[in-house]
Amino acid sequence: MAVNKPVGDNARKGAVRKRTQRKTAVMGKTAWTKRDKTSGEFMAVKKSAKKFKGVRREK
């Protein structure tokens, strides 16, 4: 489990274990999509070029 203490330092301690991310195409552009590992449902899409922080990447 990821821990976010101390509050306000804008840093994550550890990895998010139950989620993965992959690069997908949304309306012709590439985006990062976050997915729940247990149920397989897609959770969020990030339109910017940056990845989600602390989330594992799928191959």
Image: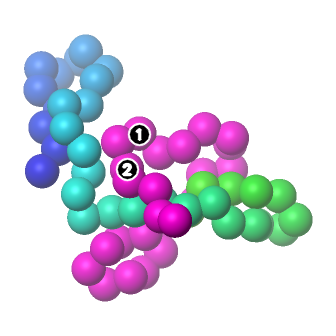
Residue type at mark 2 is Val
Q: Colour scheme in the image?
A: rainbow
Q: Residue at x 68, y 50 (%)?
A: 47
Q: Can you identify the residue that label 1 sits on?
A: 53
Left or right for 24, reference 7: right
Name the spot of residue 18 as percent of width and height, x first. Answer: 25, 64
Residue that appears at 35% across and 72% down: 36
The residues colored magenta run 34-59
Q: Which residue is mark 2?
A: 55
Q: Quadrant of residue 50?
A: top right
Q: Position of residue 3 (x, y in %)?
A: 13, 37
How packed mark 1 is, by other alpha carbons closer than 10 Å (few <14, some 14-19, many 20 or more), is few
Give the image location of residue 20, x and y in percent: 40, 62
| Numbered disc 1: secondary structure | loop
Above or below residue 19? Residue 7 is: above
Residue in the image at 23% along x and 57% along y = 17
Give the class, few, some or many, for how many residues have Cα within 10 Å of label 2's Cα (few <14, many ≥20).
Answer: some
Q: For the residues labelled 2 and 1, say whether their Cβ atoms are less than 8 Å apart.
A: yes
In the image, is residue 42 part of the stretch drawn in magenta? yes
Asked where in the image residue 38 lies, by quadrant, the reply is bottom left
Q: How many marks?
A: 2
Label 2: which secondary element: strand
Judge whether residue 18 is colored magenta: no
Q: Is residue 42 above or below residue 52?
A: below
Q: Amino acid at mark 1?
A: Lys
Image-based side of 2 in relation to 16, left or right: left
How many angstroms separate mark 2 from mark 1 (CA)? 6 Å
The residue that appears at 25% across and 44% down in the rendered structure is 15
